[in-house]
Image: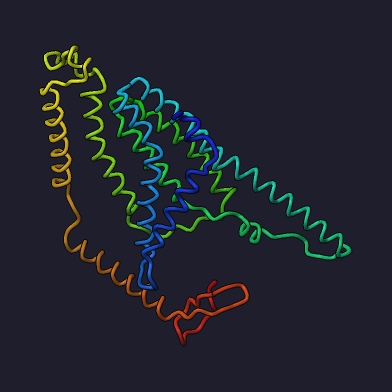
Amino acid sequence: MSTWTRRDGPRLPEISTGCTSIRLSAAPLHGPWCEQEAHDNSLIVKRFLFEAFDCYIALFYIAFELRDVDRLRVELVSLFSTDAFRRVFTEAVLPLLMQRLSRRRHAAASAAAKKEDGGAGGGGTDGGSGDLELDEHEDFDDYLEMVIQFGYITLFASAFPLASALALACNGVELYSDLFKVSYLCRRPRRPRVSGIGTWLGLLYVLVVASIFTNAVLIAFASDQLAPLLPQLFDARQRQVGQWPSGIVLLLVAVEHGLLLLLLATEVTLPRPPRWVRLTLARREHEALLAKRRLLLEAPVVATPLGDVIEATPVGGGGGSKR
């Protein structure tokens, strides 16, 4: 499966996997007691599983079935090169062209309507209404792309050590693309205060643990990196018939267990927040959760010609409705 056909064509696979993930995540929801955060976390995990399978399956086949490190390296280089231009085109250039085309059609329709009305009509749209016509900025795909890219870097680090440097250069290009997108193609984003990146951090941790196994297998069985260092463990005749000495397997298991123990020791020794800080944060989250549930239970639903409008104030309170 080539990099061009898999990553640079129409984004129909991503659209289909996104719709499937949304349907699977919406299935467990039952009433107002279900939290939006739980739904978002479920959507993140399911969407990541679909995207990870689509992005990594061909690379895993080359690495562990064909055991062709040179071809794997070429695939990674071409993937990083084409994916950076693909993201710039789909996230900045294509939306800009579609936005200008939509504005021209809207201007032509307004001019035709004004001509039919005999020259009477409004003087156009102001800046606020123009901003409302823009798409709302969503950072879900940005997080997903960064996590998938982190997997490219870590899962196949032994085959392509320069992936991190190439990813840094690609991210520098995409930084200006995102700046242009946020400035001109999207509404002004609203950024609530958060304490972290949530479920994305857990996915990064899973990729780090998985990279221990993938790189150990790549070094031991798919490449000749250990042959000059430990020639006594390698036998060319056994490798030709697909047999591997027990010494290599034992070394692989020892290195893998050693890295896992090092990871566990790092987690244990790193300083954690004091217990009173964790309790205070947990209490604040619990109070916010109760307030959100109380608001959902007390806010009435009012039917209007434009659809269902949920009142932002509790029953008996003042203020208007919030659409």
User: Residue 265: horizontal and vertical position, in percent?
Assistant: 13, 42
Q: Residue at x 54, y 55 (%)?
A: 136
Count of numbered circles in the view: 0
Residue 219 or 242: which is nearer the viewer?
242
Residue 62 or 255: which is nearer the viewer?
62
Q: Residue at x 33, y 25 (%)?
A: 160
Up-down relation of residue 311 to residue 277 (above or below) = below
Where residue 29 sits, quadrant-wise, is: bottom left
Work out which residue is located at the far bottom of the displayed protein and give it: 316
User: Residue 226: horizontal and vertical position, in percent?
Assistant: 19, 19
Look at the image and tell me in which quarter the C terminus lies: bottom right
Q: Residue at x 35, y 74 (%)?
A: 291
Work out which residue is located at the far right of the displayed protein and give it: 118
> Is 134 displayed left or right of 273 in the figure?
right
Residue 233 or 158: which is nearer the viewer?
233
Look at the image and tell me in which quarter the N terminus lies: top left
User: Residue 257: horizontal and vertical position, in percent?
Assistant: 13, 35
Q: Residue at x 34, y 49 (%)?
A: 200
Up-down relation of residue 199 to residue 232 (above or below) = below
What sort of colour scheme is used for the picture? rainbow
Up-down relation of residue 160 to residue 303 (above or below) = above
Up-down relation of residue 35 to residue 216 (above or below) = below
User: Residue 59: horizontal and vertical position, in percent?
Assistant: 36, 31
Where residue 156 sits, quadrant-wise, is: top left
> Is 170 displayed left or right of 49 in the figure?
right
